[in-house]
Amino acid sequence: MVGLSISEQHFVKGGIAQDLRTDGRKRLTYRPIYVETGVIPQANGSARVRIGGTDVIASVKAEIGRPSSLQPDKGKVAVFIDCSPTAEPTFGGRGGEELSSELALALQRCLLGGKSGAGAGINLSLLVIKEGKVCWDLYIDGLVISSDGNLLDALGAAIKAALANTAIPKVNVSTEVADNEQPEIDISDEEYQQFDTSGVPVIVTLTKVGTHYIADATAEEESQMSSAVSISVNRSGHICGLTKRGGSGLDPSVILDMISVAKHVSETLMNKLDSEISAAEACEDES
Amino acid sequence: MAAKQGAAATTYSPKPLVRTRPPIFKDSDLDWTRPDGRGFHQCRPALLQTGAVSSASGSAYAEFGNTKVIVSVFGPRESKKAMSYSDVGRLNCDVTYTTFASTGTDHKEFSSMLHKALEGVIMMESFPKTTVDVFALVLESGGSDLPVVISCASLALADAGIMMYDLITAVSVSCIGKSLMIDPVTEEEGCEDGSFTMTCMPSRYEITQLTITGEWTTPNINEAMQLCLDACSKLGEIMRDCLKQAASASEELT
C-alpha cells in the first residue's frame, strides 16, 4: 500500500491535470520498457519485462495432453499468475490470491478471445498434434517480482515476449492406430517450431485520476485512481478484450474515448515492444 | 415479508437503431434465426419478483427465459470474521450454481465480478463496521447468467433497504459473425465470436462494469454499447415498477 499525505495527493493529481506527472512524463507516455528473453532454462519460453519499478517474469511450458471432448480440434492454454508477498506485503494471503485470479482472468480474456476462438492471440488449432487424441497444453505462468503499478500491461508484455521466445519440439505421430487407442508419439530433440506471435495483443491500461486518464500509472498514481480500464488491442487495431476495475462509474462517451486513445497508444507500445523483443532475442543468440 | 408480491413479465428490448447509412447486409442475407425465435435485438421477457425468501433482509427472484436466479441479501450485520475496524461497510458476494443448473462449466469468477459490479453503487459509508452478504443462486442456467444475477442482486438490495446511488442493471450482447445479438441464450454463448457485458446505472447514465472478450471493431462496440444502454434503462424501469408494486401491495395489507 502506498501512503500519501494530503499534499502529496494534491501534487500527484495536480501534475496529472497539467499533463506533467511526478516523474516528468506526459499523461499518455510509458516508462521505459526493458525486455530480457530466455531467463528460465527449464521452460519452453520465458521473458522478463521491466517497466519502471514493475518487474515481472512470464514462462511458457508445453506439455503433451488430450484435447477436451468439446473442442477436439483445439489445444489448451491456461494462464496462472502469482503475486508473491516478496513484492509487496499486501500480496500475502487472500489479498494476493484475489489479485492473482483477477489478473489471470483479465489476461485469459485478452489472450484467448471469444468462445469460437475469434480474436484469440494464440491460435489454438496450431497446438493440435492429432485431432481428438493428442495436443499441446500450454501453461503460461506469470510471476510478479516487484510491483510499481500497471501490473496487467507488464504481464501482457511479458507473456507476448515469452511466447515469441517459445520453441516447441516437433512431434511425430505414428499413423496407424485404432480409433480407441492413444497413438504413439515421438518428440524430436532437434527440430523445434516457433510461434507466430504477431496476433498476440498488447494491453493498455488507462487509469482515471480526477477528470483525466493516464497510461502506465505508478503505484502512487494508482492509489489515487477512481477507475481503470484495461484494453487489449491487436496489430490490426481491433479490440480483443476489455476489463474495468474500480468501483466508480464512467460515462459511456468517456469509455469510447478511452478505447480510441488506447488504440493510438497501443500502436507505439506494440512497435516498441516488438523491437525490444527482437533485440532481446538477438542478444540471447549471441551469448 | 411473504406478502410482497410484485410480479411483472415485460420485455426490455432496446428500440431499433436509427441507421444513418444503409445496412451493408440485407436481412435476407441472414439465413438463420435465433434458437428461441427472437429478433436479434429482442430481449427475453423478464419476470421479476421481490420477497422470495422470508428469512432474508431482502430477496428477489428473476426469470429471464430459462435463466432462473434467486438472490437473497442478509444484513447489514456484524462482520463474522474478526476484522479490523472499518468506517465503511463491507460487501460479501457469492454466486453459486445448483448441481442441476448447467452441464459442466463452473463460474468461479462470477462472485468477484458481482462484487465489482455492486461495490460502486452501494453507499458503503451508510453501514460502517458491518457486512452485507449477497448470496445468489442460479437455479437454471439459460444464458446471460451474470447479467441476470447482477440485476436481480440490485433488486434484492433495494428490497432490503440498503442505500444505493441507483438501481443497477446489466445486459450482455453476443457477436456472431457480423450480427449482434442481445441477451444471448446458452447455445448462442457457446458459439459466439465475442461477448460484451455491461452493467450500468440507468438514471445516472454511468457504466459501472464493462467486460469485452473476442475480437471487436469500433463500430461494433459503439453499436453494442447503444443497444445495452437502451436495454439497461428499460430494464431499470421494469425493476422500478416491480419495487413500486411490492410497496403498494404491502401498504394495502397494513
Image (cartoon, grey):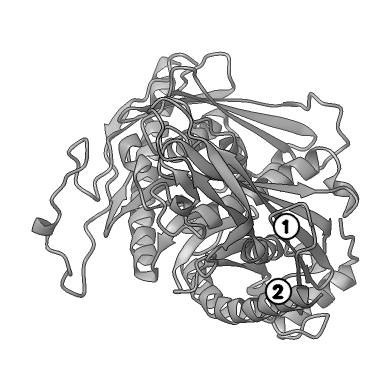
- Going by the numbered disc 2, the residue's amino acid type is Glu
Kindly tell me whether residue B167 is visible in this rendering: no
Tell me the CA gap for discs 2 and 1: 15 Å
- Going by the numbered disc 1, the residue's amino acid type is Ala
Q: Would residue B126 appear left or right of B149 to someone viewing this image?
A: right
In the picture shown, does residue B47 fall above or below A43?
Answer: above
> How many residues crowd around disc 2 within 10 Å: few (fewer than 14), some, or many (20 or more)?
some
At 83% from the left and 80% from the top, the residue drawn is A22
**Label disc, if present, on residue B194 of the rendered structure:** none
Q: Quadrant of the N terminus of chain A?
A: bottom right
In the picture as drawn, the residue positioned furthest to the left comes out as: B28
> Can you give x and y, in whole percent of width and height, for residue B161 in the image?
57, 32
The residue closer to the viewer here, B187 or B91, is B187
At 65% from the left and 68% from the top, the residue drawn is A208
Question: Mark 2 and mark 1, same subunit?
Answer: yes
The residue closer to the viewer here, B222 or B29, is B29
**SS at mark 1 in the image:** strand
Q: Quadrant of the C terminus of chain A?
A: bottom right
The residue closer to the viewer here, A185 or A135, is A185
The residue closer to the viewer here, B202 or B114, is B114
Q: Would residue A49 appear left or right of A68 to someone viewing this image?
A: right
Q: Nearer the viewer, mark 2 or mark 1?
A: 2
> Can you give x and y, in whole percent of width and height, for residue B30 in the image?
15, 54
> Can you give x and y, in whole percent of width and height, for residue B241 in the image?
36, 36
In this figure, which residue is indicated by the disc labeled 2? Answer: A281
Q: Would residue B178 appear left or right of A231 to someone viewing this image?
A: left
> Can you give x and y, in whole percent of width and height, for residue B96 in the image?
55, 25
Kindly tell me whether residue A203 is visible in this rendering: yes
In this figure, which residue is indicated by the disc labeled 1? Answer: A58
Query: Counting residues from the N terminus, which is met first, the one under dot 2 or under dot 1?
Result: 1
Query: What subunit carries mark 2?
Result: A
